[in-house]
Every structure is written in structure tokens, then in C-alpha cells.
Amino acid sequence: MPRKMSPDYWLFVIVLALLGLGVVMVYSASAIVATDRFHDSHFFLKKQFFWAVLGLGVMWAVMAIDYRRWRPIVGPLLAVAFVLLVLVLIPPFGQSINGTRRWLRWGPVSVQPTEFAKLALVLYLADFLARRQETITSFWRGVLPPLMVTGGVAALVLLQPDLGSALAIVGVVLCMIFVAGARLAHLGLIGAAAVPVVALAVMTATYRLRRVLTFLDPWADPRGAGFQIIQSYLALGGGGLLGRGLGESKQKLFYLPEPHTDFIFAIIGEELGFVGAVATVMLFGLLLWRGMRVGLRVVDPFGALVAFGVTAMLATQAVVNLGVVVGLFPTKGLPLPFVSSGGSSLLVVMAAVGLLLNVSQRAET
């Protein structure tokens, strides 16, 4: 029989640690930039603190509602996500920044529909796959339908353009399909079919091709395309074992572009050293472990797939961000969950954690 249990307190503590690290490091990385742009060194600190508190409220609200009550509305949620992804492409709804359309602005508030779409897709597919367990080994009836829905979401994200987020979405969905019981042969065929599509997307966009070439040899253009990743290397290397000390980064002094967003891990490595960087990675590793533990302990297929989908979403984003900063992947515009400066992205990951905590305390075990 279903019984209400205690939420996973270790998961909650890990998230609080990452959230606190984010507030501190956003302030440290952004104070100089904020003073130069807004004449207020606390500008980004106040924003991050506000979104962190609001995110905690969202997490508690999501945790308070039985996760099974989301099942009847997963379709409408995904429909809203599709509408928002279309609106962001249409002026004047979508806000154009550096040649991309990824933001919707209402007054002083900007939101990124892609973040909401990721979570809506996870919920929709968790419901779909839970209902189609007996057909998941069939490519046409079990695998193809969720792939078509995912393809629609990924295509709209790619039009923004945002190849990194599109690939991350596809990766999360493949993880969910695998956990649901799909055949490895089918997943292998999907992966093989995706390779030429990704290659075509890279080859037909000059800036994407430049990013790949820069990834292969950033020193070929150290003052141009390779500048940001080289500055990231210098920050990480300059930290040594114990770091320069909190607030003592040199690369944030207008060398490393936007140090408080996508490349905040480089500042962590410079100020807190190898020890601080490893501790950060370990926190994400523990988050992955606790999320998978929740999924493995759940009998309810929908709850298990929600847990695995949310965990895959958070882990994929963290791995890609950390990989970019240390030079394992080409540059992508994915923030580090809980840590990078941001509003809508932080709210979505906190809502995702709320779902994980919800499943952990309401599961049949």
C-alpha cells in the first residue's frame, strides 16, 4: 500500500549547499562587472538571492502536491511549452540577444521557455512511457512516438538557435527511453542516425563550425574565438591546490567574459582551487546518486521515470557545463545548475528538485 515517507533530506542538503555556493560565487564573480555596468557591486547578488529564495518556495510548493496529480495535465503543460517556444521566435514577443531568440520578456522579468520545456517534456514522457510499458520494445509503437514529440521540441529549440540545449533534451529523452526498457539496438540506431544530422547542423552554421575548430585548437585564434576558453584555462590553472582565496580571482577582471554565468566554475577553480573544484563536482555526483536512488526505490513506473528523467536533466546540464569549462566539449550556452547566475533556469531546476523530493516521500517502496 502507498505510504507517505520522509523526503530525501540528503538530497535537500546537497541542493542547499549548491544553492549557497551559487549565491556566494555569483557575488564574487560579478561584483566588478556589476560595478562597471550598473554602479552597484551587489546587483547580481541581489538578483541571485531573490531567485534562490523564490526557487526554494517553488520547490516546497511542488513538493507539497502529490506528484501523481500532475499526470492529468502533462499534455496541456507540454502544449504550453510548445506555444512558448513558438512565441520566442516571433518579434516582438521574443527578445533578441546576440543574434539569438531565447528569451520572453514581460516588463522587468525575462524567462527562457527552453528551461520550462525540458521539465514539461520529462513529465509528459514519464506518463507516456509508464502507460506504454508493454510496447516499449517495439520501435514503431513504443520508441517512435516519444521521439517524434522530442523532435518537435528540439527543432523549435534549434531554431532559436540553441544546438547545445537541443542535444541535451535528446540525451535526456534517450536516457528515459532506455530506463523504460527500450532495446539497445534501437537506441544505437537512433544515435547513429543523429550523427549526420548534428554534423549537418554544425557545417551549415559558420559560428558552430568555428566553435568546433576552436575546441580542437583554441590557440589558433587566442584573441578571437579561442579567447574565452583560454581565459578559462588560465583561471583554473591559476587556482592551484587551494586557490587564490575567495574574491581574489584575476580572470574576472574583464578577462574571462561573463564569469558569473556559463563559466562560473572557472572562477570557483581559481578562487577555491583544485580542492574547491573537486568538492563542487562531488556535490553534483552526490546529487546524481541520490536522484538515481530515488528512482530505483520506486515501484510506481511514473514516479520512477519522473525521478530518472529529472536526474538525467540535471546531470546532463552539469556535465556539459563542466565539460565546456575544462575544455572537454565545444562551447555551449548551458548554465551550471544551482550555481550560475540566472532566474528562469534556477526556478526550473528547483521545481525539478521539488519533484524528486515529492517522489521520494510518496513512493511505494
Image: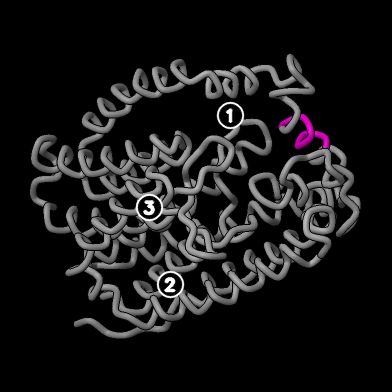
Asked if residue 148 is positioned above or below residue 358 in the image, the reply reads above
Q: Which mark is on residue 354?
A: 2
Can residue 365 be seen? no
Q: Are marks 3 and 1 in contact (CB under 8 Å)?
A: no
Q: Amino acid at mark 1?
A: Pro
Q: Position of residue 30 (x, y in %)?
A: 77, 56
Q: Position of residue 167 (x, y in %)?
A: 41, 36
Q: Secondary structure at mark 1?
A: loop
Magenta: predominant secondary structure element? helix
Residue 331 falls in which quadrant of the image? top right
Asked if residue 25 is positioned above or below residue 219 in the image, the reply reads below
Report how far apart the C-alphas of labels 2 and 1 lie in the structure: 31 Å
Residue 142 falls in which quadrant of the image? top left
Mark before the other along the chain sequence, 2 or 3? 3
Q: Amino acid at mark 3?
A: Lys
Q: Which mark is on residue 362?
A: none
**Which residue is at a point 62% across and 73% down the rendered structure image?**
50
Given residues 36 and 13, the one toward you in this image is 36
